[in-house]
Image (cartoon, rainbow, N blue to C red):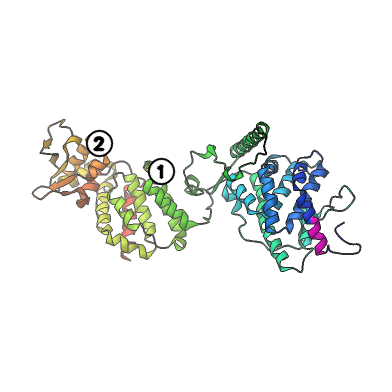
Amino acid sequence: ALCAPYASRTDALSLASARAEVLGLRASLLSLLSHGCACVREAAARLFEGALAHADAADAADAAATALQSSTVLEQLSAALFEPRLESILFTAAETGRVFISSLASADSSVLQLLERVLPRAFFHAVDDAAPLPPPATASASERREPLRGLWGAKLPSTHAIAHAAHGSAAAHNVGARDCATRARLDGLWTRVQQDHERPDLIWNDETRRELKAKMQAQMDDFYLAQQRSDEAVSWNHAEFEVDYECLAHEVRVGDVYLRLLLDGDRTPCPLHAPSRFFDELYHMLLSERVPERRLLCLHAMAVTYAAEHAAIGAFGGTAQVVALLRECVQWAEADRLMQLLHELLIERSNSRPLLAANGERLLVAVLCSAHARARHPADKEASLAAASHASSAWCLRVAREDVGRSDGEGKPTDSFTEIGPLSLHDLRIRLTELQLPEDVLRVAEVQREGEAWVGIAEAPHVWWTACVRGDGRLGGDARCALLLSLLRRLDA
């Protein structure tokens, strides 16, 4: 017995000796975790749990390394996650796995790191702060059950009994607090994994559970096969085992956040654990992404995130780059998202200075004029544009000769360019729609107002936004004008 007769606590020497003996038998105890008898399984799991409760760092690392290299951790994790819990069985394989994984993860971080590589990190965000060590009276239901009697009639101690045996030691209290914090994370984990989740930071359902179970089983089968084929001891390379969920490959994800669910207005908002980092990741994805639909998702997510978390994110260093993206934009859908992002960025007054330095105010006025012309008569948009453009001067457009064919004689070749025009802005817009010039060619084109010199098209924003920007926007004409007016008011506030 671990307690002397009439003693209420185990003395430190006896406890240390018993712990050393148990850890010395760890290879044998690991094999007993899969025993068919529930009592044997519980005895092995509880002995490990008690021995690790106050093991020093070296002993805990040795125990964790043995369990990891022998793939016992993988076997018990699979049992903890996927074996059924039956009321008719006192201590099921699932309970064995949960007690063993919880005790080992509390003692050594390598096991917890394995869990975070196998399961989505959102499962571990629920409890991040260390909880105080609870008194023995708050033990879980399984620990309040009468302790299992060992093979020789001695009562095996519960985790809380061992944790409080050396109650006078500050080191013991710190170890107990660390153990309790990790257990708090894992106790909720076992329940949450059995439930379905669909929120911005976590998608978890039957399909993901099946994929996880299949990959863990495949990993165990490969390890067993390697053991059978080798005459030497084989160790499981647990550091390289990580699960990528192929069933979620179609979802656009930035960091740990699924953009589709983040932007679903029908769902309850999900707090972001690192909003500044997430916003930076969205910005980097925007700069590198070339698929239009994904760019629109990034821009929308940036606007929504900054509106909700601007206090945590602070001033944004890429405001001038957003203005540059808007200036070069050739699709109304992306332009609408960029203007929405600029509108939210101006919540922080410090973001207005780089916008003004990039000559963004003139750009926004040009967009507003074009949007107003398109929105004046929604029922006859083409007639409205035609009336507005015919009242203005004629324009010529000049692009590289190889990029424009002379299908109808309107193109006038020079040494290295082809000129289109002079045409009204409305007719120029129709002509460009027919030609479907690549975006990179259109951005470096030159324009000339009748009687004036040639200038880059970027220096004539009214021409660009009236004749060159294509497609249907995300906003209606009136909504776009209202957004631009609100943006200009924020800029001048």
Is residue 227 shown left or right of residue 295?
Answer: right
Judged from this view, the residue extending furthest toward the left is: 451
Task: State which tag comes first along the sequence, 1 or 2.
Answer: 1
Q: Secondary structure at mark 1?
A: helix
| Residue range of the region highlighted in magenta in the rendering | 10-18
Q: Whole-percent x and y of residue 63?
A: 70, 50
- Residue density around tag 2, few if under 14, some if 14–19, many if 20 or more, within 10 Å: few
Q: Amino acid at mark 1?
A: Arg
Quadrant for the C terminus in the image: bottom left
Based on the displayed image, in which of its 4 quarters is residue 240 positioned?
top right
Q: CA distance from mark 1 to mark 2?
A: 22 Å
* Frontmost residue, 352 versus 284: 284
**Is 254 included in the stretch rendered in magenta?**
no
User: Looking at the picture, does residue 467 appear above or below residue 51?
Assistant: above
User: Looking at the picture, does residue 33 appear above or below residue 347?
Assistant: above
- Residue 318 shows in the view: yes
Q: Amino acid at mark 2?
A: Gln
Q: Which residue is mark 2?
A: 436
